[in-house]
Image: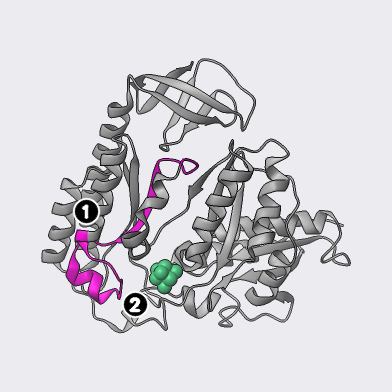
Amino acid sequence: MSIEIKTVGCRQNQYESIILKNLIDKKLIFKDINNAILINSCSVTSRAMRDTRKIINQAKRAGKNIILTGCVIDKNIIEDQEIIYLSNSEKHKIVYKDANKYDPILSRPMISIETGCDKFCSYCIVPYLRGKPIIREFDKITDEISFLADRGFVEFVLTGTNIAMAGNLIRKILNWANKSYSDIRFRLSSMDPDYLKNNIDIYKKPNVVHTAHISMQSLSNNILIDMKRRHKFEDIHKITHTLLEFDPLFAVGGDLIIGFPSEGQYEFEETYRYLEDLPLAYVHFFEYSDRNGTLASTMGNKCSNSEIKEHIHKVQTLVNKKKKAFKIKNIGHTLDAIALNDNRVLTTNYLDVFVDKITPRKSKVKIHVNNLEEDKLYGKIV
Ligand code: SF4
């Protein structure tokens, strides 16, 4: 039996693919299907959609059986009689059925705590595709963490479609881990600022690394209203400064969407100006991608494509400067990190550093950051 897995899209998909692979290898699912490819697809952006179609076409040309799951199928975006479909809801039942016991391929295993979202931000297709949040049972999550912690994994990424949907469960997991495994620590994946307004203290817990990835999406309050987000620029400002007061080397970063339909020159300039002032360590930015069925797709565009390209270029240049400034700020400091492959480590504040020695993958290390050369940080194990 051979089933290859291809994953497009978010961390939640990546997590699910690791679990599906494990179940396939143990012959617990799809045991009668041979010469196949399982595609865990995404349709959140037009690019992800294109990538999914490309993999399907390649698999067809190679004469493979195709099992398709993920976000492209629940709205019948791709219909093909030769394809075997696994709906998102079936997939979640399989993935969340038991406590998962597997050998992760990553140094920092992802632990899914929820899937789905019902916030219906105006640009987002996810609530229509993934459906209402399904919160995973606490015992299954802690069993999975215990299984991996007992095998030497020390850092975990709590992940999901929008982990803020899990509410108090996040705190409960962190408190349990603090008592049961004092040695392990957690990264929290993308975090809704609306949740952080009243829960910023979770980043001050001793077992949470000092990286916060905040789903900002825009820094213009007009746009945030049109996006149907539940926070304002002032919240992002407060969150960023609170974390930096707690630890001046805290990596505060996040996501921004450029080219949202109602974003005109004025709103873009506003986002840009605020972005200039915010002491962020990094920003992931995306060009707005129109998804049929969302509220935003019914709005007219304010900026032309050429203006959006120009805005992206401006943001890219600014973000590069911020990333460099954050790297320079860390030179001369001793930081906690986890060993990745070869002589690379990832610090708890999300810096990739090349060090003088190779240490076993996934072990905890302390490093001293020495210098920056051609955009790469170098340091030594202390
Ligand atoms: S909170 Fe995130 S996942 Fe939920 S609708 Fe908004 S953007 Fe989409």
**Is there any visible trace of residue 272 in the rendered image?**
yes
Is 224 magenta? The answer is yes
Mark 1 residue type: His
Residue 66 screen position, x and y as percent: 73, 68
Q: Quadrant of the N terminus?
A: bottom right
Query: Position of 58 compared to 84: left or right?
Result: left
Q: In 3D space, how far apart are the residues under numbered discs 2 and 1 (Cα atoms)?
A: 23 Å
Farthest front residue in view: 179
Q: Answer few, some or many: residues within 10 Å of disc 2's Cα (few below 14, many 20 plus, some between 14 and 19).
A: some
Q: Earlier in the sequence, mark 2 or mark 1?
A: 2
Q: Secondary structure at mark 2?
A: loop
Q: Answer few, some or many: residues within 10 Å of disc 1's Cα (few below 14, many 20 plus, some between 14 and 19).
A: some
**Is there any visible trace of residue 286 in the rendered image?**
no
Q: Magenta segment range?
A: 206-234
Residue 368 screen position, x and y as percent: 42, 19
Q: Residue at x 62, y 61 (%)?
A: 55
Circle 2 residue = 122
Q: Residue at x 57, y 74 (%)?
A: 72
Q: Residue at x 58, y 38 (%)?
A: 182
Along the viewing direction, whichever of 297 and 105 lies nearer the viewer: 105
Across the whole image, how many numbered discs are drawn on residues? 2
Residue 318 screen position, x and y as percent: 22, 44
Q: Secondary structure at mark 1?
A: helix
Residue 291 is tagged as: none
Mark 2 residue type: Ser
Circle 1 residue = 237
State which quadrant residue 15 falls in: bottom right
Q: Residue at x 55, y 23 (%)?
A: 343
Query: Position of 96 compared to 1: left or right?
Result: left
Residue 30 screen position, x and y as percent: 82, 66
Q: Nearer the viewer, mark 2 or mark 1?
A: 1
